[in-house]
Amino acid sequence: MELDPRGQRFAAALTSAVIILVLATGSGWLALAQAVVFAITALDPRKGPYSYVYRALILPRLGPPTEREPVAPVRFAQTVGLAFLGLSAVGYLTGLTTLGVVAAAFGLLAAFLNAAFGLCLGCEAYLLIKRASVRA
Amino acid sequence: MDVLGIGVIVAVLVVATTIGLWRRRTDGMIRDEAADKRKRAGLLAAAGLEVVELPDRKSPSANAATAAKAASGAAAAAFHGGVGVGGAASKTADGRPGVVPDAREEPGVVEENSPDASTVGESLDQGLLDRLGVGPAPVTLLQFSSAFCAPCRAVRRVSTEVAALLPGVQHVEVDAESHLAEVRELNIWRTPTLLIVDAGGHVVKRATGVPSKPQLIAAVADLLPEA
């Protein structure tokens, strides 16, 4: 299974906008909603809510993709996003606002880098985490 | 509206843009191993002595860029005409004994390395190469990839194309995750990382990210034996 990379960039841009709203309003429920979106997309990137928006509104204007990308990096990135936004929602909703802000800030950093530069922070960190956690 | 939240948004966007622009500048740059090693040694010495001054930087030589360009041009020409690739390139390099690695590391400029291969990079022991599945070849493009790595594909494409174009060049792709001991030994920190290994098993150059095809051809052409 392969994906249209432009759809992922679009989803990342939408995600950035949502997290900016989370930080601006301090809404834990919005953070939770974004976490749910991450969870659905991590399970199947083609069934992600932002993916439907992309296919309905953007794809018809762009035409079919010239290249496709594998699904594994996208799922991994979505899982990293889920971890951050889940933590952020817990923070905001339990009154640990600092935790909510810090976790959302990391989520925004990763989403914005993906949207603006096509850089996947979670994928970059993957080998570092493996190097640090697995003793060979 | 949350004032703290707005501040955090602005700070994150500034940091992200800085990271993104820096990465865009340095991604895929083919760096010279020997020069990098000297730089690291300098940094370590500075840190060990707790001296704040920066490590010694050679004055950036205009010749380095010119020579690199000439070499890449020669390589491209030789590649099209089928004339001695390594010969043309190394003559340019040898003709300018004053060429030093450009400490500023401009993107798009492949660093020239010392013509004496024995001083360049570290020699990898045969066991390590065997574990990575690297057979003997004049030049090996040794690529480290991981499953969650979209740019690894682009590096694979560029490397296989270069290996198909230039005789004597082989491309070996290794899954970093299943070779963590070797990954540590070779100082691989992120994927994709491409090591250019010569016939003697020296890591001569390395690139993290996606190098461009002309850059890679120029870097490899320097190492090929004279035809």
Image (tube, rainbow, N blue to C red):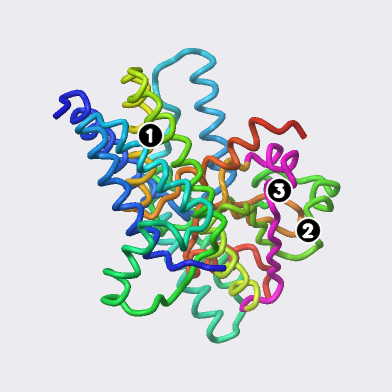
Q: Residues within 10 Å of mark 2 (few under 14, many from 20)?
A: many
Residues tagged 3 and 2 counted as in contact (Cβ below 8 A)? no
Looking at this view, is B208 or A52 the one in front? A52
What residue sits right under mark 2 in the picture?
B134
Q: Residues within 10 Å of mark 1 (few under 14, many from 20)?
A: some
The answer to whether B187 is drawn above or below residue A52 in the figure is: above
Q: Are marks 2 and 1 on the same chain?
A: no
Subunit of mark 1? Answer: A
> Where in the figure is residue A135, as x and y percent of width and height?
74, 31
Residues tagged 3 and 1 counted as in contact (Cβ below 8 A)? no
Which label was assigned to residue B5? Answer: none
Q: Secondary structure at mark 1?
A: helix
* Range of residues picked out in magenta: B165-187
> What is the spatial separation of the Cα atoms under label 2 and label 1, in whole angstroms?
39 Å
Residue B185 shows up from this direction? yes
In the picture, measured across the screen, residue A134 lies left or right of residue B215, that is right
- What amino acid type is highlighted by mark number 2? Val
Which label was assigned to residue A106? Answer: 1
In this rendering, which labeled residue sits more in front, label 2 or label 1?
A: 1
Which corner quadrant of the image does residue B134 belong to? bottom right
Looking at this view, is A96 or B9 the one in front? A96
- What amino acid type is highlighted by mark number 1? Phe
Which corner quadrant of the image does residue B138 belong to? bottom right
Q: Residues within 10 Å of mark 3 (few under 14, many from 20)?
A: few
> Where in the figure is residue B1, as x and y percent of width and height?
14, 29
Q: Are marks 3 and 2 on the same chain?
A: yes
User: Which is more N-terminal, label 2 or label 3?
Assistant: 3
Magenta-drawn stretch contains A80: no
- What amino acid type is highlighted by mark number 3? Ser
What residue sits right under mark 3 in the picture?
B118
